[in-house]
Amino acid sequence: MIQYFKNINYQTVAIDKPENGSWVNILPPLRQEEFSELSNSLDIPLEFLTDSLDIDERTRFEEADNVKLLVIKTPTENNSFNDSDAFYITIPICIIITHNQIVTVNSFENGAIKKFLNTFQNRHPDNRKMMVLKIIEKIIQTYLESLKEINQRRNILEQKLYAASRNEHLLQLMRIQKSLVYFVTALRSNEMLLMKIERTNFLGLNEDEKEFLGDLIIDNSQALEMANIYTNILSSTLDAFASIIANNQNEVLRRLSVITIVLSLPVLVASIYGMNVPIPYAHSPFAFYIPVFLSLVISLVIGWFFLKKKLF
C-alpha cells in the first residue's frame, strides 16, 4: 500500500499521486508491481525500495543517481504467536530522498512513522533533510518509550516472582531479555550510522541541522545506555532467581535427607524385631512396646541432634 501526503497550509492532506514536496509512505501489504511503478515514476533504484523487505538488512546509507538512501533500525511489537519470542523486535526502515520527494518504506506497521504523520503538518517538505532528521527523532523516541514499557514489565514480573516463582514469569523475563538484545544491537548500529552521517555530512546539513543531528546522537546514546542498564539488571535478576531456586532446592533436599535419617533407624529396630528368629524378650508381655519405645527414643534423640545443629 502506498500513501501520498502533502502539507498544505499546515494541514496534512492525502493525495492520489506523488507531487513535488510530497511525502510517499509505503506500508504492508507490499507488492512488487507497486515497487516497479514507483521506481519508474520517481527515478528511484528498485533495490532502494526493496531493501526494507529483508528484516536482517543492516543499517547504512548510500547514493545512486542523486537519490540518497538511509536504512535505519526501528522497534516494533512482535506479533508472533510463539510464547518464547521477544516482545519487541527491530526492523529496517528505508528513508529515500529523491529529487522532489521523501519516501519511507516499511515492512511492518511502524510506530515511529505514525508519530511522524501526526506532526507532518508542522514540517516543511521542501526541507527534506530536516524531515529525515525528524523521522530519526521519532524513531529514537519510539525506542525510549519501548524501553520504559519494558522496564515496567520487568518490575511487575519481578514482584510476581517474589510472591511465587512460576515458570511463566521466568519465560516472560526471558522474552524481555531477548527484546533488549534486539534493542542494544540496533541502537549500536544506529549510533554508528548517525556518527558516520555527521562525519561525512552525507545529507549536506547546515550548522543548525548539524547541531540537531548532534542532539539526536546524544539521545540515541541515552537510549543505548538505558538498554544496556536494563539488560544488566535483568541478567542480574535472572541469576539471583536462579540462585534462590537452587538454594530452595538444596534446602528441600537437606530436609528430606534429615527426615530419611530420622526414620531409617526406627525402621531398622522394627526390622530386627520382625525377624523370624529368636530374639530377646520375644515372649515378654511387653514385646510390642519395647521396639516401639526404642524407635521413639531413637527418633527423638536423632531429631534433637539435628535441631541442635540447625540442620532441620
Image (cartoon, grey):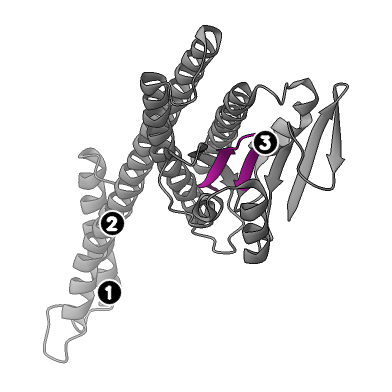
- Main SS, magenta region, reads strand
Quadrant holding the N terminus: bottom right
Q: Residues within 10 Å of mark 3 (few under 14, many from 20)?
A: many
Q: CA distance from mark 3 to mark 2?
A: 70 Å
Q: Judge by depth and name the residue closer to the eye, 47 or 242.
A: 47
Mark 2 or mark 1, which is nearer the start of the sequence? 2
Q: Residue at (23%, 72%) from the top-left corner?
A: 267
Callout 1: 10 Å neighbours few (<14), some, many (20+)? Answer: few
Q: Secondary structure at mark 1?
A: loop
* 52 shown above or below 296: above
Q: Secondary structure at mark 2?
A: helix
Tell which residue pokes out farthest to the bottom in this image. 276
Q: Which residue is mark 2?
A: 253
Can you tell which quarter of the image residue 268 is in? bottom left
Residue under the image location 63 percent in, 26 percent down: 128
Which residue is at a point 77% across and 20% down the rendered structure image? 122
Which type of secondary structure does the marked residue at label 3 adopt?
loop
Q: Name the residue: 38% across, 30% down.
A: 228
Q: Given the image, on which type of amino acid does mark 3 rest?
A: Gln
Q: Earlier in the sequence, mark 1 or mark 3?
A: 3
Q: Which residue is mark 1?
A: 286
N-terminal of the pair, mark 3 or mark 2, is 3
Q: Which residues are magenta?
A: 87-105
Give the percent coordinates (x, y) of residue 112: 64, 36
Q: Quadrant of residue 33?
A: bottom right
How far apart are labels 1 and 3 at the CA level?
A: 106 Å
